[in-house]
Amino acid sequence: MSLLSEKMSLFDAPQKYQAAGVYPYFRAIESDQDTVVTIHGKPVLMFGSNSYLGLTNHPRIKEGAIKAIEKYGTGCAGSRFLNGTLDIHLELEERLAKLVHKDEALVYATGFSVNSGVIPCLAGKDDYLLYDELDHASIIEGRRLSFANQLKYKHNDMESLERQLKRCESDKIKLIVADGVFSMEGDIAKLPEMVDLAKKYDASIMIDEAHSLGVFGQTSAGICEHYGVTDDVDVIMGTFSKSLATIGGFVAADKSIINYLKHNSRTLIFSASITPASTGCVLAALDVIAEETWRKDQLWANTARALDGFRKAGFDIGHTETPIIPLFVRDNEKTFILTRKLMDDGIFVNPVVSPAVPPEDTLIRFSLMATHTFEQIDEAIAKITRNAQLLGIIP
Ligand code: PMP
């Protein structure tokens, strides 16, 4: 065995969980992806998806993808910078900039590559990056690639953020980067307070709208629109892999920032552009979201029902106010066992365990879609409650 294989074989956590019959990852779905999916030939209720508006099977969005493939082919075989820019990329960028009320937008192949490729461009050597300790992994990646001074603040704690801002030199860029809605715990960034602090200390703000685009705001533009702080937030990023039903991402900002990114962002320049199919999907999805406003209303009705149901059942659900509901288990083993028991009961949820979160914050991530029915939600809550009681997670 090579040294490489030998070292890798020391990592045996998955095998341990597989042997115990509770390994919860890479579960293959054999059907289309709506509220009921097929796994191992059996129907399972899906409460682990980020398709908040339930759009992944929408006929108009599928048609958008098919038409784009028919016209442009299956891939761009190059980056946006060189041969990989299509007229529909430009059309999409214009639509996204308008949606989030910024001068310009730039489309990337994934949301991960937006955060990892934008953040290091905006804050360089001697500048400051101020980040929430629960920011998404792609933001962590972006700051790892930046030469800026890195200042962590406590989760959603604006006093902690202010303490860090006070440490920064006044003539350097101070970029605060945060999830708008936190991806695992479903709580919302304290944007109005953050904006006040940014003004006080002459800092800039970048907000990740991955889990808020399509979900928050009068025109579904996200959490910045919801709080009316779009003009005070310098950089908005979003992904197409949640509400927009496909894959890809974008960043939107003023002309000077987008111009800089177009010519310096390595994940844009040295990576192939988003596919024609995904571009066609997003263009169609934006139309559907604007027209079928019942989806957002139903998502919020579903969220209210689930929040109420889990609270009444005695679950600790933290500070969530969104379709992402964390059911705190606070124990790795029990989280895996509960996930497996629920799978056996026909309910798909996602376990979130250490090292992704500290062991005391281990949770089951339960997420809602607009297309769930109240009956499906009630059935899931009843099954989760029964299993959690048997495991001693709730009284
Ligand atoms: N930001 C956040 C907050 C996310 O949750 C995710 C995906 N889980 C991303 C960025 C990355 O997006 P994508 O899936 O498009 O790479």
Image (cartoon, rainbow, N blue to C red):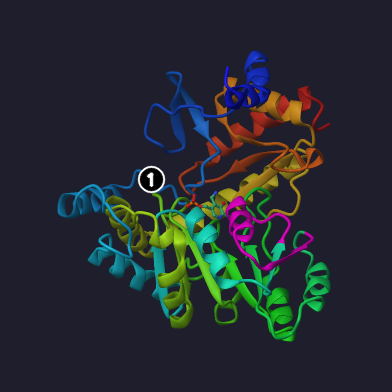
86 relative position to 286: left or right: left
Residue pictured at 43% horizontal, 55% vertical: 240
Residue pictured at 29% horizontal, 63% vertical: 82
For mark 1, give the secondary structure.
loop
Around disc 1, counting alpha carbons within 10 Å, would you say few (fewer than 14), some (14 to 19), or many (20 or more)?
many
Quadrant of the image containing the C terminus? top right
Judging depth in this view, the residue of 41 and 78 nearest the camera is 78
108 relative position to 319: left or right: left
Residue bearing the label numbered 1: 56
Q: Quadrant of residue 18?
A: top right
Residue 388 pos. (x, y %): 74, 28
Q: Which residues make up the magenta segment?
A: 132-154
| Residue type at the position of mark 1 | Thr
Residue 95 pos. (x, y %): 35, 71
Residue pictured at 48% horizontal, 51% vertical: 242
| Res 225 visible | no
Quadrant of the image containing the N terminus? top right
| Res 169 visible | yes
Judging depth in this view, the residue of 387 and 78 nearest the camera is 78
Whether 63 is drawn above or below 23: the answer is below
181 relative position to 45: left or right: right
